[in-house]
Amino acid sequence: LGARVEAVGREYAEAAEAARRFAAETGALSSHAYDHPLIAAGAGTLVEEILAARPSVTTLVVAVGGGGLFAGVAAAAAEHGLRVVAVEPRGSRALNAALGAGEPVDVPVESVAADSLGARRVSADALRWARADHVRSVLVADPDIVATRRRLWAEHRIAVEFGAATALAAPWFGAFRPAEGEEPCVVLCGANTDPADLSDAVADPAR
């Protein structure tokens, strides 16, 4: 069948608008990257896998962009009585801003992790779940995200994109500190990255 790929704009909102127009003009099926209940539901199945491997987990730490992964994880976590820590870069904080405003709002997209967490506006479902009692929103700085990605490679030989490193930056740099008896599981979602710039991380994980 083949496919035609078009790179549009500098952030997801611009590409999504171009896709919407194309679908309207051609009758093509439109598939949103995160703002769809089935997208969230599919992401939420990872909670079952985590608990099957580690039943003692009490808290899930997950990065948030537009909120598809987060909404699915939060919904599944609620069924199992788990807490969720929603982590965003300070420069791309659509969920945190929506919580403050009481509704989804447009935010600047200015973060090293913007290529995967660069949603200008969070989904309504994500905001609904973020208001739940078992969810906490935290922010991390770009330098901490960069250092986390490099340390993860230097110490564990795991190469992830900056969006995935965002989640782990929260416990490693203090935005989230587990309470006594709490057992967190960090979701490292995303390896769309070029590992070439990780080659010197062994010598200096902070670089």
Image (cartoon, grey):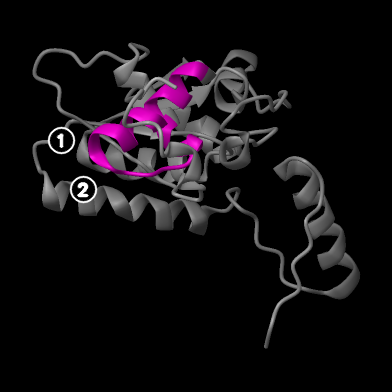
- The alpha-carbon separation of the residues under discs 1 and 2 comes to 8 Å
- Magenta portion: prevailing SS class: helix
The tag on residue 50 is 2
Residue pictured at 59% horizontal, 23% vertical: 93
Residue pictured at 71% horizontal, 64% vertical: 30
Q: x%, y% of residue 202?
A: 31, 31
Magenta residues, start to end? 143-165
Compared with 206, 79 (above or below) is below
Q: Which residue does the numbered mark 1 point to in the structure image?
A: 57
Residue pictured at 30% horizontal, 52% vertical: 46
Q: Could you tell me the amino acid type at mark 2?
A: Ile
Q: Nearer the viewer, residue 26 or 115?
A: 115
Check disc 1: other Cα within 10 Å, few if <14, some if 14-19, many if 20+: some
Q: Nearer the viewer, residue 101 or 181?
A: 181
Q: x%, y% of residue 113?
A: 56, 33
The tag on residue 183 is none
Circle 1/circle 2 CB separation < 8 Å: yes
Residue pictured at 36% horizontal, 23% vertical: 204
Q: Magenta segment: does it hold 122?
A: no
Q: Is residue 207 left or right of residue 23?
A: left
Compared with 114, 90 (above or below) is above
Q: x%, y% of residue 6?
A: 79, 62
